Image: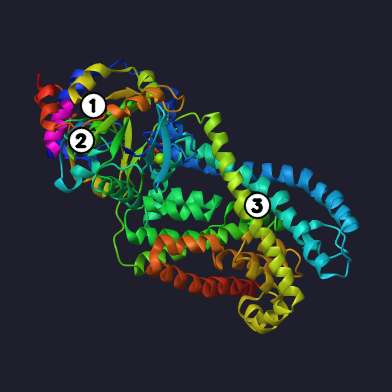
Amino acid sequence: MLDLEQRWELIDKIAKRTIKFGKYRHTLKDAIAEITVKPLTGIPIAIAVLYGFWAFFVAFAGFFTDGFLVKLFDMHWLPWLQEVFPAGKESWLYYIFVGDPLADNCFEAFGMLTSGLFVVIGVVLPAIVAFYLVLIVLEDSGYLPRLAVLIDTVLHKIGLHGYAIVPSILSLGCNVPACTACRILETKKQRFIMRTILAIFIPCGAQLGIMLKVIPETVGWVILYLLAGYFILGFILSRIVPGESPELLLDIPSYQRPTFSNVGRKLWVRTSSFFTTAIPFVLLGVIIINVLHLTGVIDWLATGLGPLLSGWFGVPKETVGALIVAFLRKDLAVAQLSAIEMTKYQMVTSVVLVSIYFPCIATFVMLLKEGGVKGFLGSLAALVATVFLYGGLLHLIWILLGVA
Amino acid sequence: MRKKLSEMMYGEEGIVKSIKESLKGKIAGMGIRVSKKVKMQTKQPIKGPVVIIIDKAETSLGLGLADKILVEVRDEDSVNGSS
Amino acid sequence: MRILLMGHPNVGKSAVFNRLTGARVTESNYPGTTVDYTKGRVRIEGDSFEIIDVPGAFSLEPKDKAEEVAVKMLEENKEAVAICVIDASKMERGLYLALQVIEKGYPVVIALNMWDVAQDKNIEIDVEELEDILTVPVVPVTAISGEGIRELALRIKEASLVKIEKIIEKAGN
Ligand SMILES: Nc1nc2c(ncn2[C@@H]2O[C@H](COP(=O)(O)OP(=O)(O)OP(=O)(O)O)[C@@H](O)[C@H]2O)c(=O)[nH]1
Ligand SMILES: [Mg+2]
C-alpha cells in the first residue's frame, strides 16, 4: 500500500496527463452558492426558505382538505354510508365501522370507514404529499448542506453539529427514516442525542397535517413548545451523556436543478409507502379503540389514570383513548382529541402530550434497532422523564397564567 | 505569510502548506491536501465553521479543524517588496 | 460474481445503481443519502449478477456509521468486483479512493459519473489515456440521463486485478 503522500504524488502525475481544466465560467449557481452560505445573506434566506416551506405546506394541504375533501367526506361519503350500511345502527359492527349514527362530520363519527378513511385520505394524504414535495426539492437542490453550515453553531450547543439538520428535517416527514439517517453523525453520543430528541420532539408530516386541521390557531405554539423542548433536552443530554461531539466536516455539493423524474419518483415511492404502512395502522387503530370502548376498557383506564391526567397534566381523563392510539399512529390520536370536550389550553397540552409521549410503534422499533438495547433504554428513560416534567410544565404554565 | 486556515479572511486565497497528521487522511477524500490553492468563502459568526473552496468545490470545516491546517497567503504589506 | 458500488458520498452511486437494476433507491443531492446497503440484480448479456449499492465513504477509515457500513461491505466481500464511482468534475479526489480500492486488491471498473457536469465546467478528461495508465476500464457516465450505463455494464467483466507498482510505472513516463 502507498502512503498518503505517495498516493497524491501518483494522482498528480495521472492528473497532469489526463485532465485539462478549460476556462471556468462563473455561473448563476456559483452566485447562489455564495449568497446562501454567507451569514449576512444566508441567514435571512434560510428563514425565508423555511417559512416558504411551511407556507406552501399549509396552503397546499388546506386547499385540498378544506376546499375539496372535507365536502366529499362530510356531505357525500358519511350520509351515504350511514344510509346504506347493512348492520343496524345499534349494532357493534355499525359502531366500529361507521361510528356515531348522529354524527354529521367524519371527524366525530369515529368509525373505521368514516374517521379512519377521512383522517388518512382527507387530511393526512394531502399534507404529506405537500410536505414531501417541498422536502424532495430541498434534498435534490443541494440546499441542506448549506443550511447545515448556517445552523452549526446552534446545534453545537446541544452536542451535535450542523449536519444534524438532515435527520431533523427528514424527521418532519417521518421519524422512521430519520432514525436511520442519524448514521451520518460521527459518534455514538451524537447519534443517541439525535435519535432521542427527534423521536420525542419532532412531529412527523402526518401529525403536522392533522394538527393543522384540528388546532389551526394554536399549532404554531405547539410547534414552538416542541422546538424549545428539542433544544432543552438536547442541551441536558449533551451534558450528561459521555462521549465526544466532533466538529463539522462537510463536503458541500454544488446546486442542481431538481429533475422532474427524480422528484416524481421519490414522491411516488414515499406516498405509496404511506399507503401501505400508514393506512392499515390507522384503520387498525380505529378498530382497536372502538373495541376498547365497547368493552369498557377505555372507561376503566380513564377512571384509573384520571387523577394523573387531570391532576398532573391538567387534561380531561378522556384523552386516555388518544394516548393509546398514539402508540400506533399520532395522526389518529390527534384526530381523536378533537372529539373531546376541553378548553383551548387543555387541547394544546393534550396535543403536546400525544407528541412527546411515546413515538409511534414504527419509530420505537427503529430506536431499538439503531440504538441497541442500551441506547434504547437510555432514550426510554429520557422519554419518561420528559413526558412528566415537560408535559407537567405546560400545565404549570397554564396555572401561572390563570387559564388552567 | 503563513497562517492558520482558521485565520484567513473572507475572500482571501492561499496555498495549503501543511496539515496535521491526524487530519490528513480524513480530509483527503474532500480533495484537501498540501499544495492546493484554497479560497476562504465564508466564516460563520460566533466561532462557527468556515467554508473553503478547493478545486471549485466547497467544503465546510469546524474552526478547530481549520486550526490544524496551515496556509501560505500573500502578504498584503509586501506585495511590492520581497515575499 | 458480486459487484459493489464504491465511491465518495454524493457522486451518484445510487443513481448508477437505479439505472443498472431498475430499482428505486433514494437519490438526493447531499452526502449521506444512503446509509445502509441495498442489494439488486443486474443483467449483463444474459447473465444476472448481484450488485450492491453502498453508502458513500470519504476514506477507508470510516468517520461515521454510514461509512462503517461501506467499509464493512468491502471487507466482507473480498471476492467482489468494485465499480468505483467518481465525480468526473472532482476527479483527483475520486482517484484517491479508487487507488485505495485497487491497492487493497479488488478488481475495479471506474465509472466517471457526472460527465455532463464536467463538460459544463469545461473540464476535459482524456479517458483513453486514463484507461491506459490505470489499466482498468474507465467509462464516462451520466447516470441521470442513463448515458454510458450500458457500456459500463458491458465492461464490468473486463475488471481485473492491477498492481499499484504497474500504475506508478505507467504514470511515470
Ligand atoms: N448532473 C448529474 N447529476 C447526477 C448524476 N448522477 C447523479 N446525479 C445527482 O447527484 C446527486 C447524488 O446522487 P446519488 O445517487 O444520491 O449519490 P450517492 O453516491 O448515492 O450518494 P450517497 O448515497 O450520499 O453516498 C443526486 O441529486 C443525483 O440526481 C449525473 O450523472 N449528472
Ligand atoms: Mg446513495
Q: Specify the quadrant of the image occupied by residue A280.
A: bottom right
Instruction: Tell me which segment is drawn in magenta.
Output: A4-12
The image quarter in which residue B49 lies: top left
- Which subunit holds the residue at mark 1? C
Same subunit, tags 2 and 1: yes
Q: Amino acid at mark 1?
A: Val
Alpha carbon separation for disc pair 3 and 2: 50 Å
- Is residue B10 shown to the viewer in this render? no
Residue drawn at point x = 10 percent, y = 22 percent: C172
Q: Position of residue A361 (x, y in %)?
A: 55, 63
Which residue position holds label 2?
C102
Reply above or below: A355 against A181: below
Amino acid type, residue under disc 2 in the picture: Ile
Q: Residue C136's mark?
A: 1
Q: From the viewer's perspective, is residue A303 above or below residue C65?
A: below
Label 2–label 1 contact, CB within 8 A: yes
**Frontmost residue, B67 versus A246:** A246
Identify the element where label 3 is drawn: helix
Q: Nearer the viewer, residue B83 or B80?
A: B83
C139 with respect to C43 (left or right): left
Q: Position of residue A336 (x, y in %)?
A: 71, 64
Q: CA distance from mark 1 to mark 3?
A: 52 Å
The residue at the point 38 percent across, 70 percent down is A374
How crowded pointer 1 is (Cα within 10 Å; few <14, some 14-19, many 20+) is rated as many
For label 3, the residue is: A209
Residue A403 percent across, percent down from the top left? 69, 72
Q: Nearer the viewer, residue C113 or B17?
A: C113
Judge depth for marks 1 and 3 and give the one in front: 1
Say what amino acid the circle numbered 3 marks.
Gly
Q: Secondary structure at mark 1?
A: loop
